[in-house]
Every structure is written in C-alpha cells, then in structure tokens.
Image (spheres, rainbow, N blue to C red):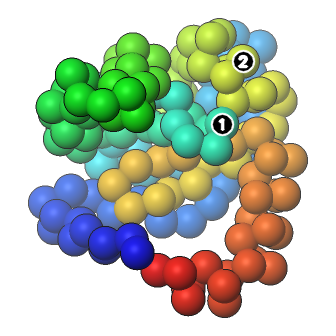
Amino acid sequence: MVAWLPVHLTLPMFLGEYLHTFDAKNRISLPAKFRKALGRAVIVTRGLDHCLYVYAKKAWEKEAARYAAQVNGNAAERGLARLFLAGSFECEVDPAGRVLVPENLKAYAGLAGKAVVAGVADRVEVWEEGAWRRYSEQLEREADALAEKV
C-alpha cells in the first residue's frame, strides 16, 4: 500500500501538460505558468520511467536531503540516491524561459524534437512525446486498477 505524503503548502504546485520543442542548442522552453515558481536556476535530473525531473532549487534541497540520507542504506536506497543525485545538474533559465538540457540527460530520456513538459505536484517532468503518449494511455486504461492498489 502506498502512503500518500502531504505536499507542503510552501512549495509551488505544478499542474498541466504542455508540448514544447527542443531548439538546435538543446534548449527547451519551460511553460510560462511555471517560470516564476521555478526561478532563474533549476535542478534537472534523471527521473523514473525515463523522463527528466525539473525542480525549483528549494524543492530540490528537500528531495536531495531525503536521498542523501539513504546514500549508505540498502542497495535499493543507494541506487536511487545515485540515480537522482549523481544525475543532477543545476541549469540556468535564460530570459526567454529556456533551459539548456545536458546531452547525457537528453539521451537518458530519449529526447529529441518535441517533448511534453508536465507539472507533477512539486516538480516538472520532461518526457519524449511518444513515450508520454504511451504512458498516459496505459495509465488511463489501468486507472481503476491502480486506484484499488493505492
């Protein structure tokens, strides 16, 4: 059974999905509705399901502290800590609201061309367009069964 954790009211709440395109310099625009809450610098890291997670620095500090506490734990805890912490980069948001995504993170998520930028509570996720479509369709088909499990 999954325990639902409360989202702290001090953190921004990101909602919605937006289709954006990477430019020739590996930059992607963040949705205008997200930019103020994300700030001038964000943390981009590998996420689960082969997407990227984008955090405001304040939200990342809380996430990073949680994973840092597990860095000497069991193999699963160490692995997740390494995935998220070693794979993270601080990225500047330019005046046009674009973020330069490191090539290794683009490769991890299979990103090229169009991507879906989705708000998921205290973080933003960046998905390859086709992967997001397939994942969303699967979730929609299995929503009732998933609800029974949680």
Compared with 88, 136 (above or below) is: below
Name the outermost residue toward the front.
Answer: 74
Helix, strand or loop for disc 2: helix
Q: Could you say where residue 145 lies in the image, as x and y percent from the top left?
A: 66, 85
Q: Amino acid at mark 1?
A: His
Label of residue 50 in the image: 1
Helix, strand or loop for disc 1: helix
Q: Could you say where residue 52 lies in the image, as x and y percent from the top left?
A: 56, 35
Judge the density around disc 2: few (<14), some (14-19), many (≥20) Cα neighbours within 10 Å.
Answer: few
Nearer the observer, 100 or 71: 71
Label of residue 107 in the image: 2
Residue at image location 75% in from the left, 52% down from the top: 132
89 displayed left or right of 3: right
Q: Could you say where residue 18 lies in the image, as x and y percent from the top left?
A: 66, 55
- When asked about the image quadrant of residue 71, the answer is top left
Instruction: Between label 2 and label 1, give the one nearer the viewer.
Output: 1
25 displayed left or right of 11: right
Nearer the observer, 2 or 125: 2
Nearer the observer, 75 or 130: 75
